[in-house]
Every structure is written in structure tokens, then in C-alpha cells.
Image (cartoon, rainbow, N blue to C red):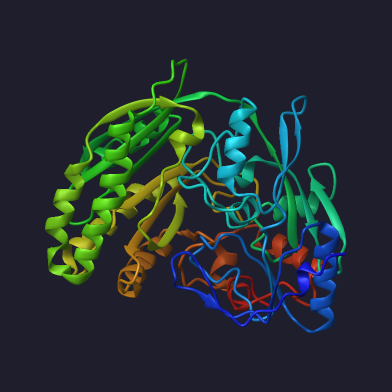
Amino acid sequence: MTDTYARTTTSAWRNWAGNVTARPARTASPASVDELVQALRRASDDGLRVKPVGTGHSFTATAATDGLLIRPDLLTGIREIDRKAMTVTVEAGTPLKRLNAVLAREGLSLTNMGDIMEQTVAGATSTGTHGTGRDSASISAQIRALELVTADGTVLTCSEKENADIFAVARIGLGALGVITAITFGVEPVFLLTAREEPMAFDQVTTDFDQLVAENEHFEFYWFPHTGNCNTKRNNRSAGPAAPPGKVSGWIEDELLSNGIFQVACSLGRALPEAIPSIAKLSSRALSARTYTDIPYKVFTSPRRVRFVEMEYALPREAAVEALRELKAMVDRSPLRISFPVEVRTAPADDIALSTASGRETAYIAVHLYKGTPYQAYFTAVERIMTAHGGRPHWGKVHTRDAEYLAGVYPRFGEFTAVRDRLDPDRLFGNDYLRRVLGD
């Protein structure tokens, strides 16, 4: 066996946003399930806690550890594509962008996905990454089976037919139940989506919100604080033909405006907060209406090069408009200066214990601030509004909720913690974040 798990480090690990830092005692980059099992046993013998890490796109400390950090770099690739069952089995460390590219070459696609694809498949699903959809749910809801290595080194295959009680909770497991080594997703033949993006007034989009959700397979919008302006996006299946954005126009919209100029605007706003309302008015008018048609991952996802910190809450869908109006009123009357738009998406109810959409039709309200900008005052005010509506915080985004609160908004919270007690009674996979959100 190669000694890939024995490498030690004194360098700090830092997440994508730079708001979480950890200094593990050592790291492991296992190249196989057997090597992972050996790394876990050695860590246990040495009294080290263990956390798997993906690409660090979570804004919480869910992957932080002072013990053994498991890196997924060598656990990548496609294990199997089963066209009869319409599934793909993929190693846990595979980035979503690589999975999407492989599926597209094979004439296949995931049904729905989030708006970025830099994460590993295990990291994305373990924290409940989602996009927007009237009928199609999060990436985790598309899991058909998963392979999990538990604290004692047991390798479990979990599905609706095998270890079903673990499968019911492990599809969004927060890294608390073990280390996921492979995931089987349901897929379908690749299809085309037509995206229609256009500006819309805040009052109109909130008044017509239910209709816009009902009439579109995937609807989302962005509200620009300090303005009454929104940008909407509707994605619907299309018979084609494909008509992707032109190279020049696509670069202008997705790179120059959404990344390059927006980066400059955010930097200026951080240096001169009093200029942010004026910048927001200009930014909200910069993106023009456009329509294009392409394969799913090229429509669902976009490059995100401007770094930020994010909080997102999942609300009962019927509460979304009221909460959003309260959020706008709070910003309008406060001295806060917010340079990032507020993102609103939806999801159908699903059956995963700790899914933010578990058991209820859901709307998501996400707030962001540019990296390096103090965010506590804004996020605290937003969180107060969201929790008043029974909001559930995204597991991978900034929040202050604890196990007592979360047990009250997740009816199946106890089901998850009971499985955790059984699989990891000594909390090999524990850390401070999990102690706060799950108890101990």
C-alpha cells in the first residue's frame, strides 16, 4: 500500500471565501477505499478526529479540523454508467464540472443542479447544494445510492433497498456519519434548456412570484438592494435547436459585466460604502434581456470569480414574499450598504431528513457580501427575519443556529442524530461546527 495517508502538514487549510481557517495535524489523500480505511484507523488509534474536505466552497466550518483532513484529490473518476438503470456512479472527490462534462459526452445529464460546479460531488451533496426548480429538487435528491466508510472502517452501500435507514439521512450527512467514497446519481438523456433573462421591477416580481414559479420549470431572480430593480431568469426545456450565447455577447455578460466590472464595483463599494447605492442603480441596469438555448449544465451554471461570504435561508414557500419585503424594508431604513444582489430560488418538498426542503415546498433567500466586508450586522438582521418565518439555514453557509433551534424546524432531526449515534458514537467525525448544529 502506498503511504498517501501518512503525509503531515503544518500549513493552514482555508476555504474558498477565506472566512474559515483550520490547521490539521496531518492530511490524507487516499487513492482507494482501502487506503481510506487504513487512514481512519490510524487516526482513531492516534486520538485524532477526522474530516473530509472538498473544494472549500462552504462558508461554514463543517470541514474544519485540528486532526486528520481527508483530501479527495485521488478519489475521482467515473466508476460506472448504467444505461439500463439510467444511473452514473462516481468517485466522491470528482468535481461536478468534470461529471457534467463526462455526462454530456455520453449524451446524459443530471436533472437539476446549482449555479456553480466547482464543488466535489460529495461536498455538494453533503451540504445540500441546490439550484431552483418547480418540480426537480436538489443534487442530493438525485442520489440513488452511496458508499459510506464509517468510523470503525466498515464500508456500507446505502440505497432505498440496502441500509435504507442510513440512506434516508446520509444523502445530506454534513460529514457527520462517515466518509462518502462514491455516489450513484439518477440521470436522464441530455436535453436542451432555453434561458430567458430579463429585468423586472421588485414590486412586479414579488406580486407575480407564485405565477412565475408555476409557469416555469426553473425560476429565480436577483434583487439589487437600494433599488427597486431585479433580474429574472426562467429556464424551461426546449425542443431546440441549440442557440448558445455568442462568444462575444456571452463574454460581455458572463465575464466582463458579471465578473470583471462587478469585481471593480465591489472593490469600490468596500472602499467607499457611501457610493454603493449609486453603484447598485448602475449595476441593476447593466444586464440586458437575453434568451439562449443550450445543454443543462451550460444554462444552470455560471462562472463565479468574485469572492464573497453568503448566508441563505430556506423558508416555507408561502412565506417567501413577505420575508423578502421585510428584508427590503430593513435595508431601506438601515445604514447598511449592500453591494451584492439578493438571490431567490425555489424547490419542491423532498424526503431527506436534513434537507432544507425536507417535507415542505421551499423558497430560498440568499444574501451575500463581498469578501473582506464586515458582514455580521447585515447577516444578523437578515437571520432575525428568516428565523421568524421558521427558516432553515443552508448547512454550508454562514448562520448562528444551534441544535435546539434546528430540532424545532426539522421534524426528522432526531432520526438523523440517532443514526449518527449508532455510526459514530465516539464522534470520530465531529468538530465544533457539528457540535453546535447537531449537539453532542
Q: Quadrant of residue 17?
A: bottom left
Q: Quadrant of residue 287?
A: top left
Q: Residue at x 50, y 71 (%)?
A: 401
In x, y percent, where is residue 221?
33, 42
In x, y percent, where is residue 231?
27, 41
Q: Residue at x 60, y 78 (%)?
A: 432
Q: Is residue 86 visible?
A: yes
Image position of 260 (left or right of 122): left
Location of residue 144 with respect to 435 vertically, above or below? above
Image position of 166 (left or right of 61): right
In front: 367, or 54?
54
Query: Which residue ends up furthest to the front in the rendered image?
Result: 2
Q: Residue at x 70, y 50 (%)?
A: 76
Q: Is residue 337 visible?
A: no
In x, y percent, where is residue 136?
55, 35
Location of residue 263 with respect to 420 vertically, above or below? above
Image position of 67 (left or right of 64): right
Q: Residue at x 82, y 58 (%)?
A: 33
- Quadrant holding the C terminus: bottom right
In front: 420, or 44?
44
Q: Quadrant of residue 89?
A: top right
